[in-house]
Image: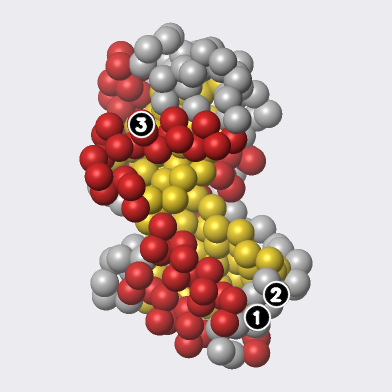
Amino acid sequence: MSRWPSDTLRIALVPGEAALLRARTSRVLTSPVRTAASLLPLLDAALSEPAWQCPRVEVVLSQHFVRQVLTPPPGKALSRAEEQALVAASLREIYGETATHWQVQVHSQPPQYGLVGAAVDAALVQQLDALLARHGCRDVHIRPLASHAARHLPARPDGWWVLAEAGWLSVFGGSHGVWHHLAAQPADADWASALPQLIEREAAQAALPMPVTVWIQALGAGAVTAPKTGTPRWQVLPHDSRTQGALALAGI
């Protein structure tokens, strides 16, 4: 688990759990309800304690709470507002009017390739911002797990990236540092053994051929070993298999 400076509080939200991590001190809060909103009253109470009061906060949202999209290639350089609009339109095509209530983050790519968009419930972000402001947090960053986890990949990944959490898989395919394919799905306890079939299926659906290296990044999903197949080449990124749930995400 990463050790963060004492002037930064890391908060992670996963279905049914919130974790707080500050330097070497951690705490896990649990809820019988698996929505992100059910965790906010627990956070509100915990942040009233002096040990967790901190002006700088980084919030990591489980991919369970995130919807991602790869847009059509815009074909030209876009302004930031135009990128946001293109991602929002692509999300509405998939999810309908529900997507109008989401807050969008954009990962820019060269204009001949699509933009990568991540969306979370705007009401959740607003409630989190307000809650943290009430507790004196002035420097707040709320991001999807993938934004944090991608920093552990090679600078220009060539191949497939499987980001695994308890109950959820996010799959990204790319070459020369550009993402060409995205997918996500629920995962059961045997998700690791099904990876060869998963990658084969996603590769068949990808618009472009992808290199055959697969990085497996498991966070809070227990011990993982690479599938025993010669192709593709499997690489398991370092992880602490003893740390479970939200606490594993807080330490990324």
Residues 131 and 250: in front is 131
Q: Residue 186's x, y, as percent?
A: 27, 45
Report the quarter where the C terminus lies.
bottom right
Q: Is residue 248 visible?
A: no
Residue 116 vertical placement versus 75 (above, below): below
Q: Secondary structure at mark 3?
A: helix
Crowd rating for badge 3 (residues with CA inside 10 Å; few <14, some 14–19, many 20+): some
Q: Residue 125's x, y, as percent?
A: 46, 62
Report the quarter where the N terminus lies.
bottom right
The answer to which of marks 3 and 2 sits earlier in the sequence is 2
> For the residues marked 3 and 2, what is the alpha-carbon distance in whole angstroms?
36 Å
Q: Residue 67's x, y, as percent?
A: 36, 44
Q: Residue at x 49, y 50 (%)?
A: 144
Question: Which residue is at the far top?
Answer: 209
The answer to which of marks 1 and 2 sits earlier in the sequence is 2
Residue 238 vertical placement versus 58 (above, below): above
Q: Secondary structure at mark 2?
A: loop
In the picture of the structure, the residue carrying the numbered disc 2 is: 55
- Number of numbered discs overlaid on the protein picture: 3
Question: Which residue is at the far bottom?
Answer: 49
In the picture of the structure, the residue carrying the numbered disc 3 is: 90
Q: Residue 8's x, y, as percent?
A: 70, 68
Q: Amino acid at mark 1?
A: Gly
> For the residues marked 3 and 1, what is the alpha-carbon distance in whole angstroms?
36 Å
Q: Amino acid at mark 3?
A: Ser
Crowd rating for badge 1 (residues with CA inside 10 Å; few <14, some 14–19, many 20+): few
Q: Amino acid at mark 2?
A: Pro
Q: Is residue 95 visible?
A: yes
Q: Secondary structure at mark 1?
A: loop
In the picture of the structure, the residue carrying the numbered disc 1 is: 136
Residue 225 vertical placement versus 207 (above, below): below
Crowd rating for badge 2 (residues with CA inside 10 Å; few <14, some 14–19, many 20+): some
